Structures are given as C-alpha cells and as structure tokens.
C-alpha cells in the first residue's frame, strides 16, 4: 500500500538535498502517517484510517464529518476500511 493519507490525499513528495557546497541531490519527504481507529457515533462503529499528523490534529478539532466534507471525500471510503 502507498504511504498516503486517507482523508487529505497527502503523499510522499520529492525535493533536493542541498550540501554546503550547494550540490543538489534528490531526496524524498515522507508523510508522517498513523493508523488510527476512529468512532463514528451516527453509524455506531469504528473505522481504521491511515491519517497524517496534520489531519489528526484537524480531526480532533473539527470532527470526521466536517473534514470529509471539506476534502470532498465520501464516507464510502471509510466503509471499505472497517
């Protein structure tokens, strides 16, 4: 499976590692992902998500429903993960 956030879609990006002499070599910036079990009260069940640290912070602040609406994700995604 790819290292990708289930809600925001954030994934590994590519950039340059710049040395003191200003030489540039390619490197990867990996996403800080966590597997998190989240309770959906209206459906009375838990779902497991692979979620980035940034989205986890937003999830605690705003809730699952509002984040899914903001990032135009469908709750059907959550159904296949349970």
Image: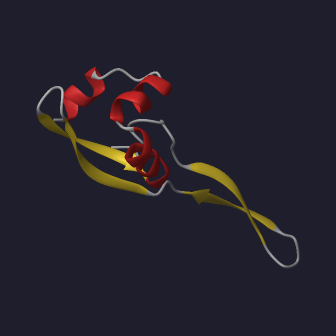
Q: Position of residue 53 (x, y in %)?
A: 45, 55
Residue 4 visible in image:
no
Relative side of 75 to 4, left or right: left
- Quadrant of residue 25 within the rendered picture: bottom right
Question: Residue visible at 52% across and 56% down?
Answer: 30
Question: Residue visible at 18% across and 26% down?
Answer: 42
Compared to residue 11, the image places residue 67 above or below, namely above
Residue 57 visible in image:
yes
Question: Residue visible at 43% across and 32% down?
Answer: 67
Relative side of 7 to 46, left or right: right
Q: Position of residue 80 (x, y in %)?
A: 20, 28
Relative depth, front residue between 10 and 59: 59
Please identify the quadrant where the N terminus is shown.
Answer: top left
Please identify the quadrant where the C terminus is shown.
Answer: top left
Compared to residue 55, the image places residue 24 above or below, namely below
Relative side of 59 to 19, left or right: left
Colour pattern: secondary structure
Q: Position of residue 71 (x, y in %)?
A: 49, 27
Furthest-bottom residue in this view: 20
Question: Residue visible at 87% across and 71% down?
Answer: 22
Furthest-left residue in this view: 44
């Amino acid at each position: 499976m790819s290292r990708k956030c289930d809600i925001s879609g954030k994934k590994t990006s590519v950039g340059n590692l710049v040395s003191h002499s200003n030489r540039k070599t390619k490197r990867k910036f990996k996403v800080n992902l966590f597997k998190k079990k989240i309770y959906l009260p209206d459906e009375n069940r838990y779902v497991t998500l692979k979620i980035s640290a940034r989205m986890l912070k937003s999830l605690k602040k705003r809730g699952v429903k509002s984040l899914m609406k903001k990032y135009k994700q469908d709750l059907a995604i959550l159904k296949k993960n349970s």
